[in-house]
Image: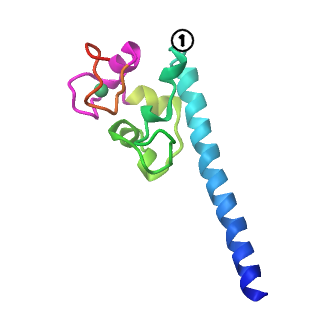
């Protein structure tokens, strides 16, 4: 019985931990769309900032790292604007230009001339 109670408490804790992370990620996603509107819907994907297709907080690509998402900081419009002139994926194109062109600022294989 005691094991079941402990197991239940851990499940409840894990649920709240995961839903907090998911909410923060969704908030960042919404902000990105607001700051950079008018893109193709497919562009607004987790892979803009994250390594996987399902964005997990902490598992971020170089662009996500430049935004401080690896340190689990909250995303702000100021942070998005502040990294527009940086090239975190090292492909020679600044993040702002990549977003304008619809390529991935955290993936060196995605550049404006080969989308
Ligand atoms: Ca790129």
Whether the magenta-drawn stretch holds residue 49 is answered as no
Task: Describe residue 101's horizontal placement relative to residue 3 as left or right.
Answer: left
| Quadrant including the N terminus | bottom right
Q: Mark 1: few, some, or many residues within 10 Å (few <14, many ≥20)?
A: few
Q: Looking at the magenta stretch, what is its main secondary structure?
A: loop
Q: Quadrant of ligand 1?
A: top left
Disc 1 Cβ-to-ligand 1 distance below 8 Å: no
Task: Describe residue 100's horizontal placement relative to residue 21 as left or right.
Answer: left
Whether the magenta-drawn stretch holds residue 90 is answered as yes
13 and 74: which is toward the camera: 13
The magenta region covers: 83-102
Q: Position of residue 64 (x, y in %)?
A: 40, 39
| Quadrant including the C terminus | top left
Q: Residue at x 50, y 14 (%)?
A: 39
Quarter of the image for residue 109 reads top left
Quarter of the image for residue 65 reads top left
Q: Residue at x 36, y 30 (%)?
A: 83
Q: Position of residue 58 (x, y in %)?
A: 45, 51
Task: Describe residue 35's horizontal placement relative to residue 6 as left or right.
Answer: left
Quarter of the image for residue 38 reads top right
Task: Describe residue 78's horizontal placement relative to residue 22 as left or right.
Answer: left
| Secondary structure of residue under mark 1 | loop
Give the image's coloring scheme. Answer: rainbow
Label 1 sits on residue: 38
Q: Residue at x 70, y 76 (%)?
A: 7
């Amino acid at each position: 019985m005691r094991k079941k109670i402990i197991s239940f408490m851990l499940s409840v804790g894990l649920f709240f931990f995961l839903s907090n992370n998911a909410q923060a990620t969704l908030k960042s996603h919404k902000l990105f769309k607001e700051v950079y509107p008018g893109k193709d819907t497919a562009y607004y994907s987790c892979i803009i900032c994250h390594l996987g297709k399902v964005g997990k907080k902490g598992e971020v690509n170089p662009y996500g790292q430049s935004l401080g998402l690896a340190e689990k900081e909250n995303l702000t419009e100021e942070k998005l604007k502040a990294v527009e002139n940086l090239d975190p994926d090292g492909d020679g194109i600044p993040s702002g230009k990549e977003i304008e062109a619809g390529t991935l600022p955290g993936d060196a294989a995605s550049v404006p001339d080969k989308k």
